[in-house]
Image: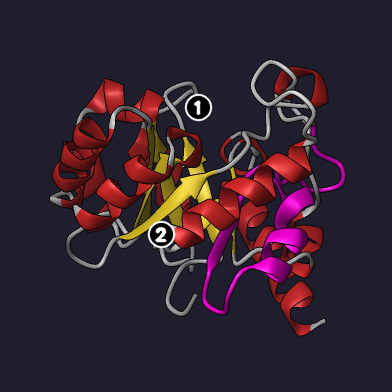
Amino acid sequence: MNGVSRVFVAVTSDCGTGVDEILKPLRGLPIGVKIGLELFTREGPDIVKAVRDQGFQVFLDLKFHDIPHTVAGAVKSACLLQPDILNIHASGGMEMMKAARQSLTGNTILIAVTVLTSLDQTDLALLAPGLTPGEACLRLALAAESAGLGGVVCSPLEARAVRTRTGPGFFIITPGVRPAAASMDDQKRVMTPGGAIASGADSLVVGRPITHASDRRVAAEGLLREVEEALRG
């Protein structure tokens, strides 16, 4: 999607230092920042403005999931913070997604979470018996598109299938991205940055490989180079 950062750095409250210190070496790079539940709950709404004021795009990763009326109100309130991207859970159902879409204001892109990258086949059996993560992801992605949402969050392993089955301009952002030498941490369905882009992802979410790096700018620049190489390829 034009104008959206190719890489969003996931900043959490366990990064070992303040948000400003984490982002300082990344200023000026064409990246965004993902603000999730953990950081948003600790710092409050002001953290969104603080990050935006440093020149970063913001992916507000709050994953709203409730009855349609409640989610609609939450989306309306979140849009007052002017995030570039905001998400909800596709598993909340079609009516919830439509209500959220109708409450969207400003230039925020509303996307839906499909299947969390921390879940594998065993985990998914509790939620959607008989479906593989890929099948569940595609079903939810198509529902999100039908509800009028701008895109989805999905594992890079499912990005190609979603890209193939959805229309042009449908935005795909993938967490679960790890450079080849990095630890998987708590992610189970992962891929390298270049592999994720080649599979159809528009943007990537990367956390610890950047935030815990000894030189965060060097780590981010290396990741951006891998993305550009994949785009050229």
Which region shows up in magenta? 154-183
Residue drawn 74% across and 23% down?
129
The residue nearer to you, when weighing 147 against 206, is: 147
- Write down the residue under mark 2: 149
Please provide percent x and percent y for residue 99.
26, 47
Say left or right for 71 vs 80: right
To which quarter of the image does residue 226 belong?
bottom right
Furthest residue toward bottom: 232
Which numbered disc, 1 or 2, marks the residue that appears first in the sequence? 1
Which residue occupies 68% across, 15% down? 126
Q: Position of residue 181 (x, y in %)?
A: 86, 42
Q: Position of residue 209 (x, y in %)?
A: 67, 40
| Residue drawn at (45%, 29%) of the image | 12
> Which residue position holds label 1?
15
Query: Residue 163 sits in which quadrant?
Result: bottom right
Q: Nearer the viewer, mark 1 or mark 2?
A: 2
* Residue 217 appears in the figure: no
Kindly give the residue lying farthest to the right in the view shown: 181
Q: Left or right: 28 with respect to 165?
A: left
Mark 2 surroundings within 10 Å by alpha-carbon count, few (fewer than 14), some (14 through 19), many (20 or more): many
Any part of residue 227 in sight = yes
What amino acid is at disc 2? Answer: Leu
Relative to 196, is 81 above or below? above
Q: Quadrant of the C terminus?
A: bottom right
Total number of numbered discs in the rendering: 2
Q: 221 or 130, which lies in front?
A: 130
Residue 220 got which mark?
none
